[in-house]
Amino acid sequence: MKLIFISILILFADQFSKIYVKGFYFPLINLEHSGLANSKSIPIIDKFFYITPVENPGIAFGIDLGPEVKTIVSILTIIATLGLIVYSFRIRKEDFISRLSITIILGGALGNLTDRIFYGYFYGYGSLLSGNVVDFLDLRIFEFFLLSKVMGIFVFNIADVAIILGVVTLLFALSRKRKIARQNSIDKIENSLSLD
């Protein structure tokens, strides 16, 4: 149960970074930050890593399915996130790595879900459930054109990193479980043969 704080930490780190990149205004305390210019790249490591704020109106990899599908995607994301929460309670007696991986995925899912639910409303360009996901970590591994599109450039956010890290960790945990189960089966067979 203590692992849930990792999800909360990921959510806060993700939202803090996105709000800083996008900008904010809190009228009660007269605090304002204009954010970074959309699609303007700031080099961190030249020709490799940049900060480039973009808004992803669709699903993974910027696939935009249109505004009518956006609400459906948001609702499906809510259902999937609730499923992760339920699953995290069901596996609370599982090994630490499995629980940690689900916790990390959950933190990332909550981060992107927050954008989808609230950003359209709070930033004044849509209703609840119609927000765009804010991406800004711009990794340029290689660049080439394919079908009039630049390939090899990946723009993502902290939530995306958490989801990928969590999935990789979960695959590692499942692989480890399979190895242990296979070894236990081999041991049982060897023990039964030695008894005969």
Image: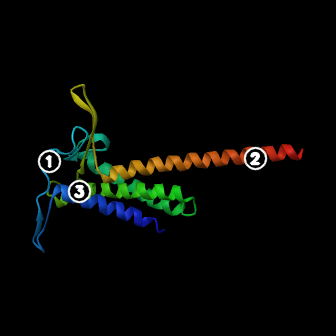
Residue at image point 25% right, 61% down: 16
Quarter-wise, where is residue 21 in the image? bottom left
Amino acid tagged 3: Lys
**What residue type is disc 1 on?**
Asn
> Residue shown at 30%/40% (left/top)?
61
The residue positioned 23% from the left and 31% from the top of the image is: 150
Q: Position of residue 42 (x, y in %)?
A: 17, 46
Question: Is 168 on the left or on the right of 158, as rendered?
Answer: right
Dot 2 amino acid type: Asp
Location of residue 10 (image quadrant): bottom left
Neighbor class of circle 3 (other Cα within 10 Å; few <14, some 14-19, many 20+) is many
Disc 2 target residue: 187
Task: Read off the residue under disc 3.
Answer: 18
**Rendered image: mark on residue 38:** 1
**Number of residue marks:** 3
Q: Distance between the Cα atoms at labels 2 and 3?
A: 51 Å
